[in-house]
Amino acid sequence: MLSEHIFYSGAIAILIGLIFYRYTGRDSSWIIILCAWAPDLDLFLYHGAFHNIVIMIIFGIIMAFLLQSFGIKFFDAFFFSVIGFCAHLLEDAVVFEEAYPFLWPFSTNTTGLALFPDVISSRGRYIGNFFRIANTDVLIIGLVFLLLAIIIRTYFEGPTWIRWYMPEKFYLKIIGIFQSGRLP
């Protein structure tokens, strides 16, 4: 489950960004989407080694220090990094019956929720039946979740919230196109 993470973490980022912006006037929730793939960096070692809360906290601290150099407040960077990492862990727990020891070192229990029972083959492999990069069942639910998040945020903030997720020049060009009423 690699490509589906962008849709689920995107929806979570949009909704968390809505709340965070309302209370702080800042929104760096794009970090959630970026960090949602971090646990799978363990593919180069032993898959599952990074899927726990200890690595999540260490990763959040490292990202907070790194993103400070780009002008993002330490708390914001840590908060969004940890949420992105946690989103990945939750998404894996929702899909897999036998998942990872997410709560290590407090528990070595690997039980997941398995809300999508038909996404694992008889050999225990994830079934990527959408161009071999995603499972259609998991992907469709992720797309619906993302669209609902977009609708909710747009309802409360209007369409300008999208500016937090793209470079300023690109955003200004898009806004100029929509305001002028003509396509380039």
Image (spheres, grey):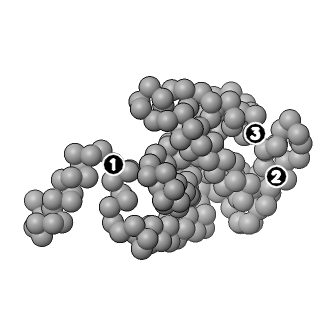
- Numbered badge on residue 52: 3
Q: What residue type is labelled 3?
A: Asn
Find residue 98 and name its label. Answer: 2
The image shows residue 95 at horizontal and vertical percentages of: 71, 58
Q: Where is residue 78 in the image (x, y as percent from the top left)?
A: 59, 37
Left-right relation of 59 to 153 = right
Q: Is 19 drawn above or below residue 155 in the view shown?
A: above
Q: Which residue is drawn at 21% across and 57% down?
A: 174
Task: Tell me the kind of residue under disc 1.
Answer: Met
Pointer 3 and pointer 1: residues touching (CB < 8 Å)?
A: no
Instruction: Quote the CA–CA distance across marks 3 and 2.
Output: 14 Å
| Discs 3/1, front | 1
Tell me if mark 1 has few (under 14), some (14-19) or many (20+) residues whose alpha carbon lies within 10 angstroms of its own: few
Count of residue discs: 3
Quarter placement of the C terminus: bottom left
Coordinates of residue 84 in the picture (x, y in percent): 59, 46
Where residue 153 appears, x then y in whole percent? Answer: 45, 67
3 or 1: tag closer to the N-terminus? 3
Query: Which of the 4 image quadrants contains residue 79?
Result: top right
Q: What element carries label 2?
A: loop
Q: In this view, does 109 lie to the left or right of 84?
A: right
Tell me the quarter of the picture where residue 183 sits: bottom left
Q: Nearer the viewer, residue 24 or 158?
A: 24
User: Badge 2, how many Cα within 10 Å: few under 14, some, many 20+?
Assistant: some
Q: Is residue 43 visible?
A: no
Q: Nearer the viewer, residue 89 or 40?
A: 89
Alpha-carbon span between mark 3 and mark 1: 30 Å
What secondary structure is marked by label 1?
loop
